[in-house]
Image (cartoon, helix red, strand yellow):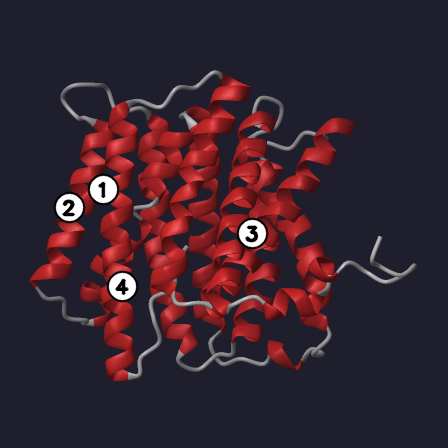
Amino acid sequence: MAYESGQPRSWLTKQAWLNLPATTRGIILMIGSSMLFSIMHTSVRYLSAELHPVQIVFFRNLFGMIVFLPLVMRSGLTFFKTTKLPLHLLRAALNVCAMIAFFMALSMAPLARVNGLAFSAPLFTAVLSVILLGERFRLRRWSAIACGFIGTLIILRPGFAPIDLGSWLTLISAALWGMTMIVIRILGRTESSLTTTAYMITLLSLLSFVPALYVWQWPQQTAWMILLLIGVTGTAAQIALAEALKTAETTVVLPFDFLKIVWAAMLGFVLFAEVPTVYTWTGAAIIFASSFYVAYREQRLSKQTTVGPVGTP
């Protein structure tokens, strides 16, 4: 071998990673994020047969906090200083409700359908930004939003098939996440990302503990391992997503987020014998394309007006 004893292979080193083009690193991070989210969603679906989704939400936040908190604590406790505590509480409450609705949807509806409908979250954010923040959209963005909601109707097919509770819960979750993104935008005007993150990981665990008490049962040994997996993969997915959007252009890496529905379809078929319909694939593609276009237009506008780009869920 050409490598000396104790010398790491070049493709495993941090420097080799940094030597990759930023676009390549961003794409890899986005693909990794989509895979980690899919593993978390599948684990929630599997474990919901034993534990109530509301309790899974609490443990997802608790283990996620344990994983992430040491990274935040390195900066000391000064980041908890804020004059926006009510907004932090509102953001956390909306986030918890969105997560509960989403985890309950995962326990009821096929994984691919839930992931497809979840792509509508940026569309809700866009509409709410007009209503609550007074932003102005032109015809092209309104057309994209309309197409996105048409994609939702293709998946649901109201009048041709009964709309299941899981699908309704997914849309409720997407709408709540849209509200959350509006609050995050407002907080971003004055709060640092460290302060926002610190309050998020702390308040999510506290707020999700209360509803979990009403359905509490102690997990078995295997369940503890799956709960830890949910917490770790969920937190790692969020970090990878944030790094992907930070490393490369949003319009370059965001299309790879569509892989969520691909992984979900594969895992759903292997583990739960779920076969996505052509309506799910078609509707999800339309929703995603519409959300992508809205994000693309937001990014172009932000470059012209020096306003930060729209966040993605």
Q: Secondary structure at mark 3?
A: helix
Residue bearing mark 1: 286
Cα separation between marks 3 and 1: 24 Å
Circle 3: residue type:
Ala
Q: Nearer the viewer, residue 127 or 282?
A: 282
Circle 2 SS class: helix
First of labels 1, 2 by sequence position: 2
Which-is-in-front pick, marks 3 and 4? 4
Count of numbered tags: 4
Q: Secondary structure at mark 1?
A: helix
Quadrant that contains the C terminus? bottom left
Q: Which residue is mark 2?
A: 147
In the orientation shown, which residue stands out farthest toward the top? 273
Does the residue at mark 1 contact the one at mark 2 (Cβ under 8 Å)?
yes
Crowdedness of circle 1 by 10 Å Cα count: few (<14), some, many (20+)?
many
Tell me how far mark 3 sits from mark 4, CA to CA: 22 Å
